[in-house]
Image (cartoon, grey):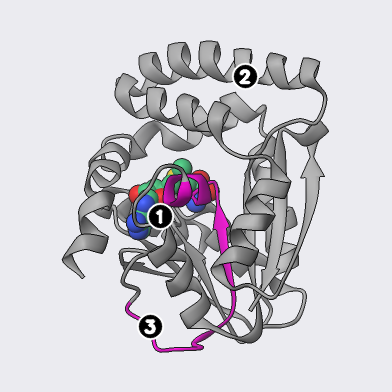
């Protein structure tokens, strides 16, 4: 198990350094579209009425809060390996009167039994787990393990626009604005340099679908958002 934790550590330090301003920076970068995209992902996660859902890489808990607000009878658990991010998530849940629970966990070694969840969601964390991350296969295997047969893994993540012109504009935006504003506001230039680099080089939606099928998911669908700048994938166990 040690080798699954090791590759996560650099990212753990990076995310633990940015929680206080993480939300505001997200809103600025995505022109508040991130909130709408999480709500769309939450609808997909809850569509089949799962009893318990996992928000993997919950960060400051926004997807968990969106799930709990819509959840009806679904119990919501948010998991992340960054304690400062989780502390912020718990603060926000307290303020919102949310019943979502937050647990410290590494995606490579989830502290849940097999088939514990009817659905697993991840908002803007899939790229971190899979882009040049040596733990990638282990993370995907863990998602499959904790999903019920037929359960779904819903991913909302930045993507690559189909049009070369729009893609070039999106890359320019990510590199310039993310590096400049992200570095200045958060004071963590390294964290945002990594985010910009991975956003530009991350595969498009077909590449992500192929990755998921290769990992053992039986069926994968996706929908492009905002001219392809982001996408929601739904992969079934
Ligand atoms: C870009 S943030 C996304 C946060 C949140 N889901 C959102 O919608 O804003 C990625 C999160 O993934 C977490 N993370 C990255 N690698 C992880 C791992 N191996 N195990 C658990 N959490 C991880 C980081 O701590 C960070 O909070």
The residue under label 1 is: 89
Which is more N-terminal, label 1 or label 2?
1
Task: Identify the element where label 1 is drawn.
Answer: helix
In magenta, the rendered stretch is: 111-130
Quadrant (top left/top right/bottom left/bottom right) for the N terminus: bottom left
In the image shown, does 12 or 87 lie closer to the viewer?
12
Above or below, 164 relative to 40: above
Q: Give the residue furthest to the left.
A: 2
Which is more N-terminal, label 3 or label 2?
3
Disc 1 versus disc 3: nearer the observer = 3
Tell me the residue at 32%/79% (across/down).
111
x and y, in percent, of residue 18 in the image: 33, 34
Above or below, 130 relative to 158: below
Name the quadrant containing residue 187: top left
Q: Is mark 1 within 8 Å of ligand 1?
A: no
Q: Residues within 10 Å of mark 2 (few under 14, many from 20)?
A: many
Disc 2 versus disc 3: nearer the observer = 2
Above or below, 68 relative to 73: above
Disc 2 versus disc 1: nearer the observer = 2
The residue under label 3 is: 112
Q: Is mark 3 within 8 Å of ligand 1?
A: no
From the viewer's perspective, tell me whether residue 217 is left or right of residue 90. Answer: right
The residue under label 2 is: 171
**What is the CA distance from the residue labelled 2 to the residue labelled 3?**
38 Å
Tell me the residue at 55%/58% (across/down).
122
Task: Identify the element where label 3 is drawn.
Answer: loop
Quadrant (top left/top right/bottom left/bottom right) for the C terminus: bottom right
Residues marked 2 and 3 touching at CB (< 8 Å): no
Q: Please give the label number shown on residue 164.
A: none
**What is the CA distance from the residue labelled 1 to the residue labelled 3?**
20 Å
């Amino acid at each position: 198990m040690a080798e699954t934790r090791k590759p996560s550590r650099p990212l753990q330090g990076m995310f633990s350094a940015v929680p206080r301003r993480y939300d505001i920076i997200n809103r600025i970068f995505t022109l508040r579209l991130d909130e709408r995209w999480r709500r769309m992902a939450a609808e997909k996660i809850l569509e089949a009425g799962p009893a318990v859902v996992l928000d993997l890489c919950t960060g400051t808990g926004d997807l968990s809060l969106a799930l709990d607000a819509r959840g009806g009878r679904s119990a919501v658990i948010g998991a992340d390996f960054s304690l400062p991010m989780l502390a912020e998530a718990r603060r926000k849940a307290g303020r919102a009167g949310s019943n979502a629970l937050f647990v410290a966990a590494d995606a490579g070694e989830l502290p849940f039994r097999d088939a514990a969840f009817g659905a697993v969601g991840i908002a803007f964390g899939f790229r971190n787990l899979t882009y040049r991350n040596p733990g990638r296969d282990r993370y995907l295997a863990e998602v499959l393990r904790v999903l019920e047969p037929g359960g779904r893994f819903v991913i909302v993540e930045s993507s690559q626009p189909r049009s070369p012109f729009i893609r070039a504009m999106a890359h320019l935006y990510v590199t310039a604005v993310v590096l400049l504003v992200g570095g200045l506001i958060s004071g963590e230039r390294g964290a945002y340099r990594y985010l910009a680099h991975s956003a530009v080089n991350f595969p498009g939606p077909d590449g992500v679908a192929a990755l998921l099928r290769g990992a053992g998911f039986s069926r994968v669908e996706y929908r492009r958002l905002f001219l392809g700048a982001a996408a929601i994938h739904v992969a079934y166990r």
